[in-house]
Amino acid sequence: MNEYKIIKIDELILFDRRDIRPDVINKLKERISAGYNPARPLTVIEKFEGFLVADGNHRLTVLKELGYTEVPCVVRTGNEYSIAIECNNDEETYAPEDLFDRLNTIKQLKEQGLTQSEIGDIIGIGRGSINQYYMLINKIDTNILDLCKVHQKGRVSENDTNVSFNFTEGWFRDSGLYELTDEFQLKLINSFIVDKFNWNKTKVQQTSTKYKMYIDMIELTESDLQDQFKTKEIIEMIKNGVFNTIQQLKKRIVELNENAKNKLICGDCLIELNKIPDKTIDVVLTDPPYGIDYKSNFSKFNNHITKEGLLNDNDDAVELFDKTCEILNKKCKDDAHLYFFIDTKNYPTFRQIAEKYFDVKTPLIWYKSDAGIGDLQYDWINGTEMIIYCMKGYRKLNRRRVNVLQYPRLHSSDMIHPTQKPIELLKEILSVSANKYDIICDPFMGSGSAIKVAKEYGCNYIGIELDRDMFNKAKNNIG
């Protein structure tokens, strides 16, 4: 039973189901300043040791500001949400309920643990409609809803320069915004506002479709573009509408990948390796300086390539190897294989460095079946060279084989580099670790033989060489 009574203002509790709209407050102030009409009582429910205002919260706000101490009220029993919605629908009001009031109500009831059916019963709509509102709440970012609310018809002041629009659940459902990321939702809404909401349903949907294509393009770029340094640039081009179709973008990615996947670089490997995106390299196959100031005594010609020294093959070689491994640890994928040629004398030192960054496995032994002469009286013939084999993470071998590799050395007349390795030896190593399209890196490229083998294998490659003359010879060797 409803009860009409005068209640003190300080006993009344504002119901936070809806936002208090400033423009409505201003209109009510003009009317109530001349005296409050007792024929329009507030609707309240006895609750929280006071009276919760189910209907009339704008009026209560004005009454407090004007210094009223009491106001006529109708005390009702029932659910405050049901009563509030019922009153708002029945009465002529300055602030009719809109989409954002409805969303706020549903959120509050959901937070109270009510089911969709229970919420529908309280609000007076079916469970299917509640589900549509749930979809809107879940699919549209809160900041975007807040932006739309600022421009909602009925909330924009008559003196405001902002143009208003009647956002509804159906408008959002049909707009295509649900398929967009927050970034592109905001982009569409901002464009809609700038154009003063002069878009029909078709234009809204066409714009959403365009932005959905941009999202697909960005995903394609992030997954397929190999040169990560170019990713940001391409994404900006996508957002600026440079690509009209997915096929146009795919063609551009193919072109960039062709340029990016194979790199021959003349420069310091410590500098150039840092330019490579992290977790890029599948296999490292390289012959670093050992620190022995290598010069061969094998050739009888004093001006032969084997008589030439090597850059960085001095006391700094150990530090160089350490720094190189440190960088490679970042640049290799989490399942990479690494091979470092090293002489027997320096194997322990270089192995110890490699162990700082990688899991060092069984060493490989290159048995040179036509070994050099060496010390004719006091030493055994040195017919081997060591290869440090490491892993980063876990990567299965393509096939297992014994760790002794028997291949003759290159004849000096076939060499363009003092420590050039036989092609067949390098092929054997790659056959165990590399797969087609893997990225093979040789940061001490020398003659380019490792890169040449990688190319023949159908792998991508990154070769770095410090010596300009040797770099040019390596390019010719690689072809």
Image (cartoon, rainbow, N blue to C red):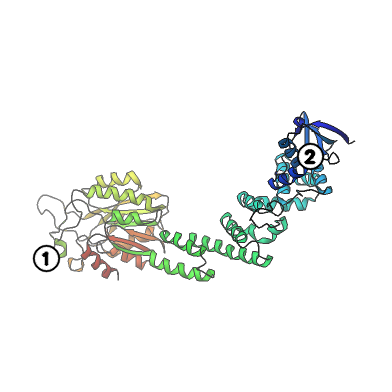
Front residue of this view, candidates 117 and 30: 30
- At horizontal 75% and vertical 30% (from top left) the residue drawn is 10
Q: Can you say whether 147 is above or below 176 in the image?
A: above
Front residue of this view, candidates 265 and 138: 138
User: Which quadrant holds the N terminus?
Assistant: top right
Front residue of this view, candidates 325 and 128: 128
- At horizontal 14% and vertical 65% (from top left) the residue drawn is 304
Badge 1 vs badge 2, beta-carbon distance below 8 Å: no
Mark 1 — residue?
A: 303
- Res 317 label: none
Q: Taking 249 as reference, is 424 left or right?
A: left
In percent of width and height, residue 388 lies at: 30, 51
- At horizontal 83% and vertical 39% (from top left) the residue drawn is 41
In percent of width and height, residue 152 lies at: 68, 53
Outermost residue, front direction? 34
Q: CA distance from mark 1 to mark 2?
A: 101 Å
Q: Residues within 10 Å of mark 2 (few under 14, many from 20)?
A: many
Mark yes or no: residue 402 visible: no
In percent of width and height, residue 314 lies at: 18, 51
Q: Amino acid at mark 1?
A: Asn
Q: Amino acid at mark 2?
A: Ala
Q: Taking 316 as reference, is 330 left or right?
A: right
Q: Can you say whether 81 is above or below 133 in the image?
A: above
Mark 2 — residue?
A: 54
Mark yes or no: residue 449 visible: yes
Residue 163, by quadrant, is bottom right
Mark 1 element type: loop
| Mark 1 or mark 2, earlier in chain | 2
Disc number lying in front (1 or 2):
2
In percent of width and height, residue 25 lies at: 72, 44
Q: Residues within 10 Å of mark 1 (few under 14, many from 20)?
A: few
- At horizontal 42% and vertical 66% (from top left) the residue drawn is 257
